[in-house]
Amino acid sequence: MSTAVSPESSPTMQGKPLSIAVYPGTFDPITNGHVDIIKRALSLFDKVIIVIAVNALKTPLFTIEERIDMINQCFTSNDRVEVDTTAGLLVDYATSKNACAIVRGLRAVSDFDYEFQLALMNRKLQRRVETVFLMTGFRWIYISSSIIKDAARHGGDVSGVVPAHVKTALQTKFN
């Protein structure tokens, strides 16, 4: 079980405690829906750590290094965004980074049941870390990394649903 971090050891910004959130996912690849959630989370928190969760049950198209690079390219001029990875319990990672929240995006009601169960388990493991659900922007509600990869694999145009550098990376992988 994680232990709470004392306020005295928390990072600060201009003398007040820094509010840090973690936004986990596989980001294989990062989509415009992810970017939208991250930008909106930045309006709520001082810092957002994008955490690439290593999931042994998934076989990603892109390496961890490629995903880190694609995410960093989306936020090159924003020092309030950090990218990291974890293979352990997310709530333990969040605690180790002094995060007060885990940000999760919801596209549809079907996402909620699973996300709600995860949030409750995280709450049981570490009461100090809250889960914050952000509804996906309406224009991104239908997209997922899996759907985008499938479209790109079959020659579909993924312009507008992923950043331009991600579209190029997908084309390179599938050509």
Image: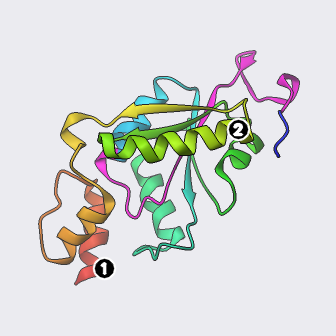
Quadrant holding the C terminus: bottom left
Residue that appears at 31% across and 70% down:
169
From this viewpoint, which residue is outermost toward the top?
Answer: 15
Hey, what amino acid is under mark 2? Lys
Depicted 93 relative to depicted 85: above or below: above
* Residue that mark 1 sits on: 173
Is residue 24 rendered to the left or right of residue 113?
right
State the residue at coordinates (66%, 36%). 123
The foreground one among 43 and 93 is 93
Q: Distance between the residues labelled 1 and 2?
A: 41 Å
Location of residue 98 by image quarter:
top right
Q: How many marks?
A: 2
Task: Please tell me how crowded label 2 is: few (under 14), some (14-19), or many (20+) other residues with Cα within 10 Å.
Answer: few
Secondary element at tag 2: helix
Question: Percent from the top left, x then y, of residue 70?
Answer: 42, 60
When the figure is inspected, residue 17 is found, relative to residue 36, above or below; the finding is above
Depth check: 123 or 133 in front? Answer: 123
**Residue 18 at what x, y percent from top left?**
68, 25
Residue located 40% across and 40% down the image: 112
- Which numbered tag is attached to residue 47? none
Q: Which portion, as a residue range, is magenta?
A: 5-33
Q: Looking at the picture, which amino acid does disc 1 mark?
A: Lys
Does residue 20 belong to the magenta stretch?
yes
- Front residue of 92/124: it is 124
Quadrant position of residue 84: bottom right
For disc 2, the marked residue is 124
| Residue 19 in view (yes/no) | yes
